[in-house]
Amino acid sequence: DAGVIQSPRHEVTEMGQEVTLRCKPISGHNSLFWYRQTMMRGLELLIYFNNNVPIDDSGMPEDRFSAKMPNASFSTLKIQPSEPRDSAVYFCASSLDGGWNTEAFFGQGTRLTVV
Amino acid sequence: AQSVAQPEDQVNVAEGNPLTVKCTYSVSGNPYLFWYVQYPNRGLQFLLKYITGDNLVKGSYGFEAEFNKSQTSFHLKKPSALVSDSALYFCAVRDIIESGKLIFGQGTTLQVKP
């Protein structure tokens, strides 16, 4: 398996523009996580899906952020409109969960810069 | 709420010496604990986990971790550090009470000097 695949790897956009980050989890995995990493705040969980259903979105910063998982092999994280403070590395991770004792596998991340 | 804490922002050790990266946890019920490593400009890589059983868990790249229930700790260790071990290390806990989400500590930078 190719692992968790994220695209794009790098994104530079202007403030106010819409940004869409994409993630393909490992085939067969049924849990998916979106994280944001910054120097100031470390690694923050934004949203967690299980079997394509959002289970915990308490980490989503505000209404500008939205995430979807239309099927088991694809998820998106959208920011609209984007702001400079959204600049960060966004990671997607997936795991095969039977009882929450399994490890998550991370993608390479998307480095977002909002200017 | 479930949480983990890494009390050290950075750990410095000489190559060949033993290393310890500390992690303490706060959970309700039995903890599911994990260690990950992040190299520059890369995603996180899984090192090892504790679910149940033996308190000493062995993982990738010669790392091990000791689960201590009385001290609520899960410290990462390696008998002999390598310069290539220099990276950012994260401890994590699975929130099995509320939602199953994976919660990370703030990370510890390990610097191994030749």
Image (cartoon, coloured by chain):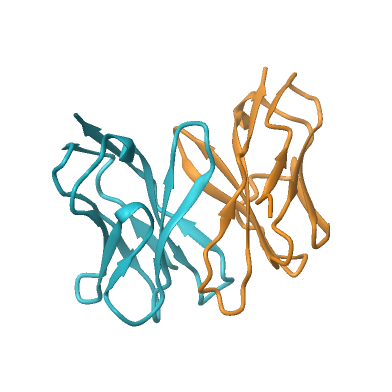
Query: Left or right of A38: which side holds A2?
Result: right
Residue shown at the point (20%, 70%) measured from the top left = B71
Image coordinates of residue B9 in percent, x first then y, are: 28, 40
Q: Which chain is orange?
A: A
Q: Which quadrant of the figure has residue A111? A: top right
Nearer to the camera, A76 or B15: B15
Q: Residue, x 43% and y 67% (percent of image)?
A: B2
Left/right placement of residue B36 relative to residue A103 reads left
Q: Position of residue B11 (x, y in %)?
A: 22, 40
Farthest residue to the right: give it.
Answer: A70
Left or right, A47 with reference to B82? right
Quadrant, the C terminus of chain B: top left
Colour cyan, chain: B
Residue B84 coordinates in the image, percent (x, y): 33, 36
Q: Whole-percent x and y of residue B59?
A: 36, 61
Is A114 in front, or is B55?
B55
Is the N terminus of chain B in the top left, top right, bottom left or bottom right quadrant? bottom left
